[in-house]
Amino acid sequence: SQKIEQNSEALNIQEGKTATLTCNYTNYSPAYLQWYRQDPGRGPVFLLLIRENEKEKRKERLKVTFDTTLKQSLFHITASQPADSATYLCALETSGTYKYIFGTGTRLKVLA
Amino acid sequence: DSGVTQTPKHLITATGQRVTLRCSPRSGDLSVYWYQQSLDQGLQFLIQYYNGEERAKGNILERFSAQQFPDLHSELNLSSLELGDSALYFCASSVASGGFTDTQYFGPGTRLTVL
C-alpha cells in the first residue's frame, strides 16, 4: 500500500546546529514533494516545493533534497534557532489525482 | 494570517448529532480543500472543490459531505457524529485547481469535540 513515513520521534538539537528531517515514501511516483511547518493548534504553512527533476532546493536557511531512486526527501534547517521549533510535515500529490497525502510529521525542538 | 477563515473555532457536540463547518478562502482563490487531523492519523485529505465543482476526493466518510457555493465559500457537513470524529478540521485554499504550482494556504482550523 502507499505510505509516507516521517520519524515520529521528536528531534532535539542544539541551537546553531543543522537539523535534518527525513521523509520516505513507498509505492508513489510523485511529480513533486512539499514541506510544511505546523505550530501547535495552527494550520500548516507551506515552506518549500521540490520537483522530481530537481535534486536540491534552497530557501534562506532551508534546504530540501529529493532522491526519487531512494524514494526519500531530506529537509535541512541550518543554523537552527529556538523559533524553528515546530512540527514539519512532508506532503505529496499522487500523480494526476489531485489527492494530497501528508506524512505524520516530525516534531523539532531547538534548544537554546 | 493566511487569509483563510474558518468558523467556528471550537465546536462541542454529542454523538449522533450533525454539524456544519464553514470556510472562506483567500480572496481570488478558486479551490478549497478540507482536511481532518487527529493525533493518531495525522493530516488526512478529505475533499477538494474547484470553482464550485468537486475536484478530488480523499478519505471522506459517507456521513460527511461538502459543497462550495457561488461566492466560493465552502461548508463541510458532518452527520451521525461518532467519538472518533473528534479532530481538528482544516480548510485550505489555492488559486488554481491544484498541481505543483498551486500553493495551499491553510486556515486556523475548527476543533471538533464529540462527547
Image (tube, helix red, strand yellow):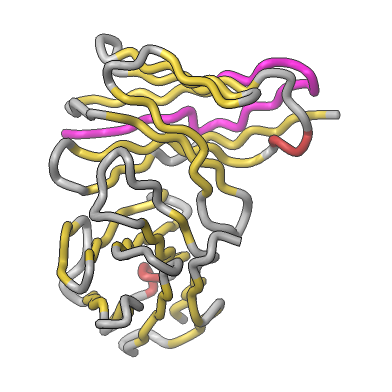
Q: Is residue B48 left or right of residue A85?
A: left
Q: Is residue B43 above or below residue A36?
A: below
Q: Is residue B48 above or below residue B21?
A: above
Q: Is residue A74 above or below residue B64?
A: above
Q: Is residue B51 left or right of residue A96?
A: right
| Magenta residue span | A1-20
Report the front residue among A84 and A104.
A84
Is A40 included in the stretch rendered in magenta? no
- Name the spot of residue B46 as percent of width and height, x first: 27, 60
- Quarter of the image with the N terminus of chain A in it: top left
The residue drawn where x is 40% and y is 65% is B91
Report the front residue among A24 and A37.
A37
Is A2 included in the stretch rendered in magenta? yes
Report the front residue among A82 and B29.
B29
User: What is the tally of numbered marks visible in this picture?
Assistant: 0
The answer to which quarter of the image holds residue B54 is bottom left
Report the front residue among B88 and A47.
A47
Q: Is residue A26 above or below residue A104?
A: above
The residue drawn where x is 41% and y is 49% is B42
The residue drawn where x is 80% and y is 29% is A111
The answer to which quarter of the image holds residue A60 is top right
- Name the spot of residue B5 as percent of width and height, x first: 50, 73
Q: Is residue B59 left or right of residue B75?
A: left
- Quarter of the image with the C terminus of chain A in it: top right
The answer to which quarter of the image holds residue A77 is top right
- Name the spot of residue A107 as percent of width and height, x first: 59, 37
